[in-house]
Structures are given as structure tokens and as C-alpha cells.
Image (tube, rainbow, N blue to C red):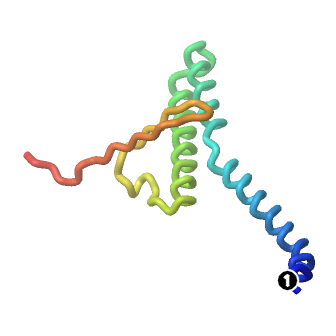
Amino acid sequence: MLFVDDLLMMPFSGFGFILRTLQKIAEEQFTDDAPVKERLLELQLKLESGEVSEEEYAAEEADIIRQLREIENRKRALVGAPAAEQDRGLAFTAGETKASASVTFHQDTERKS
């Protein structure tokens, strides 16, 4: 009887697998910061070559940094961590395509005079 049940449920479990795979791909694209970092690099090259002024660079850089913070907050939300603004720390991530490292420095809340 269990074999018959498995055969009857196979189309539904296959559909569930497809939906889980699509969700995983969507989450990866939603949290991919590589295109935004490429835009920042291109902007820096344009500044060095003189294609954009300092003011244009500053405005567009602020927009790119805002987008990077949003992506970081999305990543944190997916794992259940608080948003970066709530963490009150400085986060730095460096890495290549396959390996990466992450370092977070936290600010002391108590100061001694």
C-alpha cells in the first residue's frame, strides 16, 4: 500500500522540489552583491579617467553603498540576524569567487574617561 501511495504522491513531491529549487535560486540572486561591487569598480575607473566629476562620483557612490547595505541586511534577514544598523558594528568582507573571509568589529558601548 505504501508503494501505491508513493506513486500517487510523486507528481506533488516533484513539484515541491521544483519550487524549493526556484526559491533557492531566487534567494541567491536576491543576495548577490557582485554586480553592485562591479558598478562601484567601474565608477572608480570612470573617476580616475575623468569621465565623471567628484560630485557625480560621490552621489553615485552613496547610492551604491546604500544598495550594498540593503543586500547585507537581506542576507542577515535570511539567517535571522539583526540588521547591520542594529548591530552597531563595522563589517568588512573580503574574498575571491570561491573563498571569502568576514571580520566584524563591534563598538564599545561604554566609554571610560
Q: Secondary structure at mark 1?
A: helix
Amino acid beneath label 1 = Leu
The quadrant holding residue 26 is bottom right
Could you tell whether 87 is left or right of 53 in the image?
left
Q: Residue furthest top?
A: 49
Residue 63 % position (x, y): 56, 40
54 shown above or below 33:
above
**Viewer-closest of 87 and 14:** 14
**Viewer-closest of 24 and 64:** 24
**Viewer-closest of 16 and 27:** 16
What residue is rendered at 7% in x and 46% in y?
Answer: 113
Residue 101 % position (x, y): 47, 37
What residue is rendered at 59% in x and 14% in y?
Answer: 50
Could you tell whether 36 is left or right of 89 in the image?
right
Dot 1 alpha-carbon crowd within 10 angstroms: few under 14, some 14 to 19, many 20 or more = few
Residue 65 % position (x, y): 52, 39
57 shown above or below 75:
above
Quadrant (top left/top right/bottom left/bottom right) for the N terminus: bottom right
3 shown above or below 87:
below
Could you tell whether 31 is left or right of 88 in the image?
right
Q: Total marks drawn?
A: 1
Residue that mark 1 sits on: 2
What residue is rendered at 88% in x and 79% in y?
Answer: 3
Q: Residue furthest bottom?
A: 1
What residue is rendered at 47% in x and 59% in y?
Answer: 81
5 shown above or below 102:
below
Residue 14 % position (x, y): 86, 67
